[in-house]
Image (tube, coloured by chain):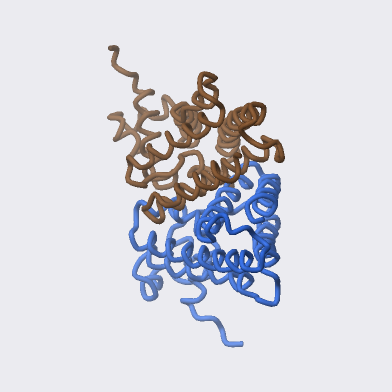
Chain colours: A brown, B blue
Amino acid sequence: MARPSLRENIIEAAVERFHAHGYAATGVKDITDAAGAPKGSFYNHFESKEALAIVALERYGESRRFDMLCDESVAPLARLRQHFEFLRDENLETRFARGCMVGDIAVEMADHSEAVRATVQSSFTYWREALATAISAAQQAGEVSRAQEAATLASFVLNAWEGTLIATRTDRSAKPFESFFTMVFGVILR
Amino acid sequence: MARPSLRENIIEAAVERFHAHGYAATGVKDITDAAGAPKGSFYNHFESKEALAIVALERYGESRRFDMLCDESVAPLARLRQHFEFLRDENLETRFARGCMVGDIAVEMADHSEAVRATVQSSFTYWREALATAISAAQQAGEVSRAQEAATLASFVLNAWEGTLIATRTDRSAKPFESFFTMVFGVILR
């Protein structure tokens, strides 16, 4: 296998550091050290930490398994559940540490960088639309009531998920996940 | 009126700076400058920035109007709605900037400071219990179904609120509030 490029190492280190420590708490030197790159080389690859954050957010988004929401070999409601189970299990593996990197960076940066805010917004929009498509398919299949619009349901469920991750890391407990699954799959999507 | 003490000025400045800029992005000097205090005086009042964050979180919590949730002169469901309308209107005043300072500090610090995490947890627990008490009263009054436990409903609604604030600042839009009120008061609490 070809040795990954320095740029690639920097992106991977940035995803790891931003996710684990947050944006402001991570310096360029932390990232280059973790990437095994000289600090001076950073600016050959990225204009700024902000520019790197945008690429890191896109990279993180690719790991969210949005494809699960579009897998038509699985019934719509089952794939919605499996998607959130995948995300929950990932969080259980880190023993409740770390949230959703998109939400975390939104909290830190949405008010302070227009470019980062726009990237976070794109990620959430993509995710919300994938959720709405699956919810709409569940409505067409008669699995979910049509009383509420799929877009409203998708927006609310996504926001509830983001808040649930704040609660799991605060409480260091899986209990907020239980409330999420009970309410989303027992009350909201039915 | 007596001149507020330097300590009080530092606390007020910390609430303002942490809320507007986040924990890591706010230095002790930013706070003492905003408080009109010499930087050296900080450690006469607080052992560390972390110790100040704990006091700032408690101060911020006092502004959340949890008392609205306990006001028995208002019907339980109406006071739940008024509580979230109060919080929504506060966010509209800042044109969607700033989230909930408790959630924001949870995102930045829950994985990195046990003392801060415990304070955030106390704040959320207090809030969740006040919500559960009002929801339970609404159930007893026949305003809300007893199909789900008040504690589960309170936990989920609080988490949905925290995520909704991430969405409003990301989208710079009141639309996530509309989904919240539609779903919470049209579907969940009924």
Q: Is residue B27 left or right of residue B143?
A: left
B40 horizontally vs B93: left or right:
left
Who is closer to the viewer here, B73 or B87? Answer: B73
| Observer-nearest of B35 and A24 | A24
> Outermost residue, bottom direction?
B1
Q: Quadrant of residue B133?
A: bottom right
Q: Quadrant of the C terminus of chain B?
A: bottom right
Residue B115 to residue A158: above or below: below
Residue A162's x, y, as percent? 51, 45
Q: Quadrant of residue A30?
A: top left
**Corner quadrant of residue A44:** top left
Give x and y (percent) for residue A154.
Answer: 62, 37
Residue nearest the observer in this picture, A49 or B151: B151
Residue at 45%, 51% in the rendered image: A176
Quadrant, the N terminus of chain B: bottom right
Q: Is residue B170 above or below residue B135?
A: above
Rendered residue at 61%/32% (across/down): A143
Q: Is residue B85 above or below residue A157?
A: below
Residue at x-position 46% and y-position 64%? B125
- The location of residue A51, given as percent across then percent down, is 50, 32
> Residue, x 43% and y 28% (percent of image)?
A63
Callout count: 0
Q: Residue B76, how many percent across, how many down? A: 66, 68
